[in-house]
Structures are given as C-alpha cells and as structure tokens.
C-alpha cells in the first residue's frame, strides 16, 4: 500500500466515523430487534412466554434438528434446524439447563425456507428444544445432548 492509498482510506474512515457519531449513517433497518426479557429469562417456560406468549407446544415430526449426541466442547455446539411446515413464522432454540435457556430466536419471512444453522453454548448435559411457530401454533422437536466439557459458565 502506498502513502496516497493509505491517506485516502484513513480519510474515508474518518468521514464514516463522523457520520456515524452524528447519527447520519446508522443502518437502522439492518439492526435486529432484541427481546431482552426473553433472553434474560431463567426458565424455559418463562422464555417461551416472553417470546411467543404461550408455552404450550406439540411435538412435530416435521421439524428436523441435527445436533451431536455428545458435544465434546460445550462452548461450541453446532445445531441445524429445518422445518417442513407451511407458513413458518419463527424458529427458537432453547436449552433447559443453561442459565438463560433461550439460545436463539429467528424470524422467518414469508416465502423463505425455514432453515437455521448455528452454534450455541451449553453449560451441561441438557434437553435442547427447537420450537417452530407456524400458522399460529407452537411445535417442537427435542434432543438430549451430552456435554463433556462445559462452555456456559463451567
């Protein structure tokens, strides 16, 4: 990188920083809404009530959750959720034994494929629930994941 290119990049960064601090360049439509109370809930039922207004769910064989049976490191547990249901509105991921059970919540837009792949932290062996809201109903798939090394405060 030569001097002229360096000065151009530094100048651009300065202008961008000034615009952000003045509130002119905020990507407000990109920022996701965060349900702070739901993510700070201490129980699974409390988190479900905060997110969906209900905790009554039915088991569904049309929700597919791919996750390891044994997580060798609880700090990084890969999970994939796919739903073969019409009119999916949201997908939530809850871990019963975590200090804050709600690990993730995704809004699914109309016409999009209800598919989520993420990594979560788990403190200890627990049931993990994939909760899908479709046509106003809450449906779930559950899997027990054993954790050998703690990742969520352990």
Image (cartoon, rainbow, N blue to C red):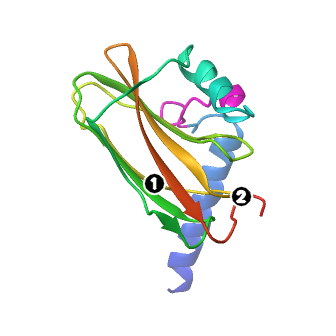
The reply to whether the C-beta atoms of the residues labelled 1 and 2 are less than 8 Å apart is no
Q: Quadrant of residue 146?
A: bottom right
Looking at the image, which residue is at 53% across and 78% down?
4
Question: In which image quadrant can residue 6 be found?
Answer: bottom right
Magenta-colored span: 27-38
Nearest the viewer among 43 and 38 is 43
Q: Is residue 103 left or right of residue 154?
A: left
Q: Position of residue 20 (x, y in %)?
A: 65, 43
Task: Relative to 80, say whether 106 is above or below.
Answer: above
The mark found on residue 118 in the picture is 1
Which residue does the image show at 29% across and 37% down from the upper left? 114
Q: Which mark identifies residue 31?
A: none
Helix, strand or loop for disc 1 = strand
Q: Which residue is mark 2?
A: 152
For the residue pair 13 and 79, the one nearer the viewer reads as 79
Toward the bottom, the furthest residue is: 2
Of pointers 1 and 2, the one earlier in the residue sequence: 1
- Would you call the spot at circle 2 few (<14 residues within 10 Å), some (14-19), or many (20 or more)? some
Vertical placement of residue 125 versus 56, above or below? below
Q: Residues within 10 Å of mark 1 (few under 14, many from 20)?
A: few
In percent of the image, x 63 and y 25: which residue is there? 45
Q: Position of residue 123 (x, y in %)?
A: 69, 57
Give 146 or 89, whichever is nearer the viewer. 146
Q: Is residue 116 left or right of residue 51?
A: left
Decide if residue 45 is on the left or right side of residue 117: right
What type of secondary structure mainly makes up the magenta span?
loop
Quarter of the figure with residue 46: top right
Give coordinates of residue 25: x percent, y percent.
57, 39
Depicted 81 relative to depicted 45: above or below: below
Residue 73 counted in the magenta span: no
Rounded to the nearest angstrom, the CA distance separating label 1 from label 2 is 16 Å
């Amino acid at each position: 990188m030569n001097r002229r290119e360096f000065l151009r990049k530094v100048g651009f960064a300065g202008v961008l920083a000034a615009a952000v601090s003045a509130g002119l360049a905020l990507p407000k439509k990109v920022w996701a809404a965060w349900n702070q109370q739901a993510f700070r809930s201490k129980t699974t039922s409390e988190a479900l009530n905060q997110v969906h207004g209900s905790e009554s769910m039915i088991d569904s064989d049309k929700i597919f959750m791919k996750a390891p049976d044994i997580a060798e490191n609880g700090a990084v547990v890969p999970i994939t959720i796919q739903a073969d249901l019409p009119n999916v509105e949201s997908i939530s991921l809850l871990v019963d034994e975590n200090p804050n059970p709600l690990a993730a919540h995704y809004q699914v837009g109309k016409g999009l494929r209800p598919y989520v792949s993420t990594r979560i932290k788990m403190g200890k062996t627990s049931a993990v629930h994939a909760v899908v809201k479709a046509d106003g109903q809450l449906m779930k798939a559950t899997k027990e994941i054993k954790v050998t090394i703690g990742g969520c405060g352990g």
